[in-house]
Amino acid sequence: MYGLEVGLFDEIESNGEPLTAAGIARKFNYDKSTTERFLNTLVSLDLLDKEVHKGNVVYSNTAGTTKYLTRSRRPALIASAMSEFNVILPLLSNLTSTLKSGKAFIDMANIKAGKMLNNENPPMKNIHIEDQKDTAHNKGSHTESSHTPGVNCTNGVTPNGTNGISANITGTNGTHTTNGTHPDKASNGSKPAMDCSAMIMLSMDGLTVPCAPVLVKAFDLSAHRTAVDLGGGSGLIGRTLASHYPEMNITVFDLPSVVQLAKKLYPENSSGQVNFVAGNFFEDEIPDADLYVLSHVIHDMTEKQIDILLKRVYNKLPPGGSLLILEKTLDEMKDGPSFAVSNDLIMSLISTGRERSAKEYREMLEEQGFTNIQIRLVGGYNYFDAILSKKPF
């Protein structure tokens, strides 16, 4: 994690060729011997490669590190890893309180909506991100029949300590304010810090981008002509839908502050096949579509909120229209997959929502009148399965 904080992987990448331990120590003003031990630790974690070149031992980024842990790539896993290290792990100190009270320590839904909390929030170190184009890609996708783990979707690198929650809260030890896109320069000369809302968006994108092509092809959606991604954030799922279904018109519907941030972080969102509409899906008119998408939305909500939202979606859908839910499902005994179970526990600290089993999602949808419910499990280290249901004719 320290390698991310100081920009070690970016330094190695920008150098254009492998660096010696002495060279890295000079760049960061570190002790050579300790630097070498630190670099060897990163090699053991498969974050760096080590080889002998022209008689010198040199270090370079692994392919996974370059793809997911450098600021030249977007989306990356930097935001996800840093937010978990600086936020989720400290929040675990409040587990005893949550176990006794049954109440979350913070409400992540409010933070995602741009509502900053009070000074009782735990402090968070400044996290540094630079704006770049979305260049990450995922190779291959394959789906199996319902309830059969088949497709594999992993993040390429899995930083130790990752629990799958991409969350962030406003820092209390930083002194710099940013607008999320063009951060102010830090007085100590370090890379500028990105604000909370931007960190959450980038964190979610980092976890989603390796899986997105798999998810949009888990079912054949080619019959649909209009799709609305409710709570679609940056538009990553919408852009992926557009790339696989060129005849589909896609709308990303999210809160005004989220839409504004998405357009700043991803200027390419402003034109083309994907359109952004600002609004609140509990209060405002939902755009018309024959396919609605809810990606990592349901698990943040209370049962009452879910009931309201699903009713609104069902009433807007035309007969034969579909709802695609993208959430990780627990097994029926709720003791696996391990990262989904860990995620569920973490959610008890940060939200009023929870993870659910495939059976629970099926029953939830059937209660609203949806039929032809299909569930595709996505294998590998990831935080998504795909659930498709239809409104009957």
Image (cartoon, rainbow, N blue to C red):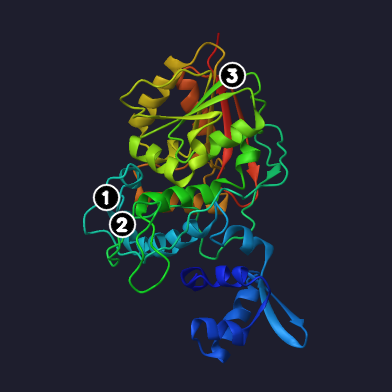
Three-letter code, disc 3: Arg
Three-letter code, disc 2: Thr
Q: Residue at x 46, y 27 (%)?
A: 364
Q: Residue 31 got which mark?
A: none
Q: Residues within 10 Å of mark 3 (few under 14, many from 20)?
A: some
Circles 3 and 1, Cβ within 8 Å, touching? The answer is no
Q: Earlier in the sequence, mark 1 or mark 2?
A: 1
In-front residue for pair 338/242: 242
Residue 191, position as x, y percentages in the image: 43, 67
Image-based side of 309 in relation to 17, left or right: left
Instruction: Specify the quadrant that holds the C terminus.
Output: top right
Image-based side of 183 in relation to 219, left or right: left
Tell me the SS state at disc 2. loop
Residue 283, position as x, y percentages in the image: 30, 25
Q: Which residue is mark 1?
A: 116
Q: Residues within 10 Å of mark 2 (few under 14, many from 20)?
A: many
Q: CA distance from mark 3 to mark 1?
A: 38 Å
Q: Residues within 10 Å of mark 1 (few under 14, many from 20)?
A: some
Q: Residue 225 got which mark?
A: 3
Q: Report which quarter residue 34 is drawn in.
A: bottom right
- Looking at the picture, does residue 331 appear above or below residue 98? above
- Looking at the picture, does residue 219 appear above or below residue 124? above
Tell me the SS state at disc 3. loop
In-front residue for pair 94/255: 255
Q: In the rendered image, is residue 363 in sight?
A: yes
Q: Earlier in the sequence, mark 3 or mark 2?
A: 2
